[in-house]
Image (cartoon, rainbow, N blue to C red):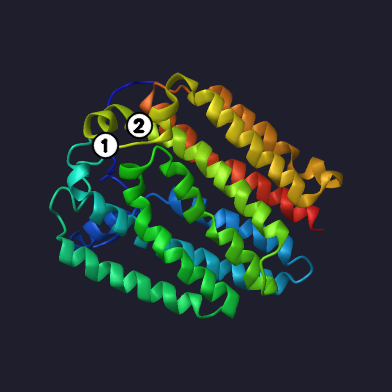
Amino acid sequence: MSNQPHQDIKHNSRLLHLFPQDLRPYVLLARLERPIGVWLLLIPGLWAIALAGAGNTATQIKTAILFAIGSIVMRAAGCVINDIWDRDLDKSVERTATRPLASGQISVKQACIFLGALLLTGLLILLQFNKTTIVLGVLSIPFIIAYPLMKRITWWPQIFLGLTFNFSALMGWSALTGEISQTALVLYGSGILWTLAYDTIYAHQDKEDDALIGIKSTARLFGRYNCILVYLSYAASWALSIYAVGTHNFLCVFPAGIYALYLCRIWTPDDQKSALDIFKKSKIYGLTLLIGFACAAL
């Protein structure tokens, strides 16, 4: 694969051209043309729905649909918050320099109005659930707001992203049971470790620019030992998935472990395009686990 620098924005997206010219910067700001983030936010919630709602298919489907819509909306909101915080930093990073806020296509005021609309929509979706789930949803907001600042403060922003993104596992469980069980916490932990793995890989795209502007990440912290970190993170995530379903259902989640090993083997740490490719493929690990959880719940 090539080591040539690449841009974050893809103006040739088919989805982008479905929108009027004036709305396209908002589509790009919300990353609607790149659904990988929606998948990574949604999948842990689906894990919980698959395990907690066994035997109640209609409720599972309804809950999954609401979570899917909510994931689209809240991922978009998270992207807007991220780009508001990072608008000056993004100008200094080649991959992100053409983002709508960094390039001046959208003002901060316009972004804030858009963010307000997204958060209101997210609240309307959240109110369809029980009290426990609503409380969890509200508790996730400070994490969403604070996450973009973590790369300025700690070498472990990937862990904080994991804490933020995987709230959906707790919410998925509580949406169907009204409580947070030990299994829900195990799924949450598995998701955090999965996030540590895929976002460490993702951070390799920017590690040179990040070093110049003082941005911290596990990709920079671990240096030549990043492969070990990613291997161990995936292994620990997979081990927790086995714990969640019980060792008697080991074969249900076995394929996910094999796929995680495959991703680690084909990743080329010093290749930007390899980092992006493996990051995108990480959703397959999550979906493979989802299938395994669904089988274990039968």
Residue drawn at x 61%, y 28% is 262
Where 137 falls versus 30 (above or below)?
Answer: below
Where 206 falls versus 1 (above or below)?
Answer: below
Q: Is residue 261 visible?
A: yes
Residue carrying label 1: 95
Q: Please state, as top left, top right, bottom left or bottom right, where the N terminus lies in the image.
A: top left
- Residue 254 image offset from top left, x and y in percent: 75, 38
Residue carrying label 2: 205
Is residue 154 left or right of 173 when viewed as pictured? left
Disc 1 + disc 2, Cβ < 8 Å: yes
Q: Secondary structure at mark 1?
A: loop
Q: Please state, as top left, top right, bottom left or bottom right, where the C terminus lies in the image.
A: bottom right
Mark 2 crowdedness (10 Å alpha carbons): few <14, some 14-19, many ≥20 = many
The alpha-carbon separation of the residues under discs 1 and 2 comes to: 8 Å
Q: Quadrant of residue 116?
A: bottom left
Specify the amino acid type for callout 1.
Arg
Earlier in the chain: of badge 1 and badge 2, it is: 1
Residue drawn at x 54%, y 55% is 166
Residue drawn at x 54%, y 59% is 167
Is residue 233 left or right of 52 when viewed as pictured? left
Where 140 falls versus 209 (above or below)?
Answer: below
- Residue 286 image offset from top left, x and y in percent: 60, 46
Mark 1 crowdedness (10 Å alpha carbons): few <14, some 14-19, many ≥20 = some
Compare residues 69 and 205 and report the one nearer the observer: 205
Is residue 199 left or right of 174 when viewed as pictured? left
Specify the amino acid type for callout 2.
Gln
- Residue 32 image offset from top left, x and y in percent: 36, 56
Is residue 100 left or right of 78 when viewed as pictured? left
The residue furthest front is: 153
Where residue 142 is drawn, which disc sits there? none
Q: Quadrant of residue 67?
A: bottom right
